[in-house]
Amino acid sequence: MESKLFTPFQLGPITLRNRFIRSAAFENMCHNNTPSQELHDYHVSVARGGVGMTTVAYCAVDLSGVSFDGQLYVRDEALPGLKKLTDAIHSEGAKASIQLGHCGNMTHFYSCHCMPVSASNGFNLYSPTIHRRLRVDEIKTLVKKFGEAVDFCREAGFDCVEIHAGHAYLISQFISRRTNRRHDAYGGSFENRVRFLKEVMDEVMRHAKDDMAVVVKTNMWDDCWRGTDLEEGLRVAREILKHKPHGIVLSGGTVSRSPMTILGGAMPYKTLAHYMPMKSFWWLKAALNFPGVAPVMMPTVPFKELYFMEKAKHFQRELKDELGDTKLIYVGGVQSGDNCQTIMDEGFELFQLAHVLIKDPDFVKHVQENPHYHAGCGRSNYCVGRMYTKDMKCHECVERDGEPIPACLKKEIAKLEAKAKKSMG
């Protein structure tokens, strides 16, 4: 009998050929903020490898929301390359999605060409940058830009947009009491802190009409001091549900305080420091090389497969009577065909995965051939540490392509992979 994994699924107005979605893991493959041949080749290879839908990551709705030179933002110059990409993805039988967001105080002057903005004034130690509070008229402009971005994505041939409302980027910065210290209609009470999210969702759903699927990535919890906890995370999810998106991706953690909660496993500190550019991350680069500082700034989280499952099941139970046609989408720690089947057995009809598709774009085909296939991703997170100045790529693929990796980084990779293997039993 054919596994439910490989049966079609209706996500709003679009039909996916199976239940596998490549999640919006940042590729850093958009040189000068424009789609590159590397971005095209990677996502086409994932589509050819069998996913139901692949997601282009981290597209900012405005230049002010850009963190990296290799990051997309909505502008006409990107259209031809994106249209070529979506046509190629469709020709392989997959659907094309794109993540829309704004990095807020996770930007810096070198990338966004202005003073970084956020819900409130402050200094982000992790970017590092000084940022200023958005005026109300600027908030309204950004809301409109989210809607215009949906129209842009439709023109570029995308079938789906994913709104990034988690991980301590701009929408999340408004939601969290840690980063939102406003005293106007966008700060203070929970109702005020989710106002920006609600206005963005109103605009996005209006522009999506009846031909674009919409999913939202939200945090179940922030896993940091004064961040959103599980109870408030449920309240945020309920606010999202009022707008009737087609899917909600259940994630957690913040890029600024708990990045390994998002990614699972160890942060490769030496790799991160090696690839981090001096001009924009000088302070962080220096701190990572200072003994004892890095583990305090970015603590390791012991890796386990399907690491968000228990919290995702909690959300599933609490929201079951309110979901309507909206689907909860699982993400986090997918390593094998058995993991994929477990997700189905737990009642999640769609799921996202990235690490295994960075290592092996043909992962889905392998699972179809062997239901117990394990990708063998060692979870050293070298691919993540590398992304500050290079494209996101597994160390095995880097070495296979003939690019040298410094001996000290190879030693770190081996150590972290041994540790992850031990934690997985």
Image (spheres, rainbow, N blue to C red):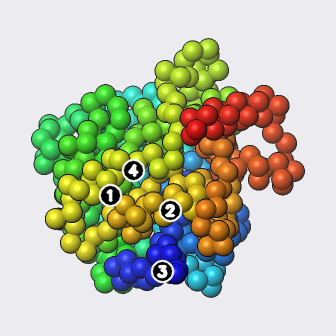
In the drawing, what numbered circle is on residue 7?
A: 3
Image coords of residue 126 (percent x, y): 48, 31
Q: Name the residue located 68 percent from the left edge and 34 percent from the top edge.
A: 418
Q: How far apart are marks 3 and 2 (CA)?
A: 13 Å
Q: Which amino acid does label 1 sit on?
A: Leu
Q: Is residue 124 left or right of residue 327?
A: right
Residue corresponding to mark 2:
340
Tell whether label 2 touches label 4 (CB within 8 Å): no
**Circle 3: element type:** loop
**What residue is rendered at 61% in x and 34% in y?**
422
Q: Going 66% across and 44% down the picture, which residue do you hit?
A: 378
Answer few, some or many: residues within 10 Å of disc 1's Cα (few below 14, many 20 plus, some between 14 and 19). Answer: many
Question: Is 241 or 85 nearer to us in this picture?
Answer: 241
Q: Which secondary structure lies at badge 1?
A: helix
Question: Mark 1 or mark 2, which is nearer to you?
Answer: 2
Amino acid type, callout 4: Met
Query: Mark 4 or 3 closer to N-term?
Result: 3
Which residue is labeled 1 in the image?
Answer: 142
Mark 3 and mark 2 residues within 8 Å of each other at the beta carbon: no
> Does the rendering let one see residue 76?
no
Give the residue type that dot 3 points to.
Thr
Residue density around tag 3, few if under 14, some if 14–19, many if 20 or more, within 10 Å:
few
The span from disc 4 to disc 2 (Cα, nearest Å) is 12 Å
Kindly identify which residue carries mark 4.
Answer: 309
In the rendered view, tell whether residue 154 sits above or below residue 305.
below
Q: Which of marks 1 and 3 is in front?
A: 3
Residue 149 left/right relative to 381? left
Q: Which residue lies furthest to the front in this view?
A: 1
Circles 4 and 3: CB atoms closer than 8 Å: no
On the picture, is 313 further left or further right than 261?
Answer: left
Image x and y of residue 144, in percent: 30, 65
